[in-house]
Image (cartoon, rainbow, N blue to C red):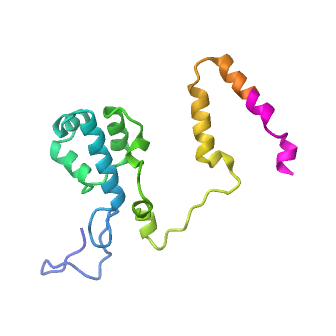
Amino acid sequence: MGLKDEKGLQDKSAAPLSSRGRMPSGKPNPVDVHVGSRVRKRRTLLGMSQEKLGEAIGLTFQQVQKYERGANRIGASRLWDLSRVLECPISLFFEEMDESTAGSSPRNLNIESPDIKTQEGDSMAKRETLELVRAYYRIKDYRVRRRIYELAKSLSEPEETAQG
């Protein structure tokens, strides 16, 4: 909380309170609302009550309600727990997010935040690369994986040609 003067009034010269990721208006951040709605959608799809979900992750149903409305932000460890209980990847909570919502993340609301860009030539940072690697390692049979590896290698350009 902020500092108070001798009359118990809020000291306006004190540092502003943390917005905790909320919008300047004080409303919940649209990203948090989106994530909460995705939690609600998945819970409902599984036929699970707020009370049952709360019990599974050590919360009251009121706390689950606040998460689902976006009134309370969901921390990383809680998001992990939710993904386990709701039997889904964490990425499910961020799917179908429109550009406007994504653009209102706290980092984008802070003028002082520098843009963090991945290096344009870094193929290891591309989503396609990560999805390909994940799919490759889901292939259980080592011989099949090895054949796919050899096929990809044979179809690609030699390294010195690709760099030149």
Q: Residue at x 32, y 72 (%)?
A: 24
The residues colored magenta run 151-164
Horizontal side of 61 relative to 128 (left or right) equals left
Q: Is residue 136 magenta?
A: no
Residue found 72% across the figure and 22% down from its top: 147
- What type of secondary structure mainly makes up the magenta span? helix
Which residue appears at 76% of the width and 26% of the height? 150
Q: Is residue 126 shown left or right of residue 26? A: right
Residue sitting at x 28%, y 43%:
41
Q: Position of residue 58 (x, y in %)?
A: 22, 37
**Above or below for 107 versus 60:** below
Closer to us: 12 or 52: 52
x and y, in percent, of residue 16 in the image: 31, 74
Residue furthest left as drawn: 7
Q: Nearer the viewer, residue 76 or 15?
A: 76
158 sits left or right of 149 in the view? right
Q: 52 above or below 97?
A: above
Percent coordinates x, y for residue 113 in the rendering:
50, 68
Q: Observer-nearest residue: 146 or 16?
A: 146
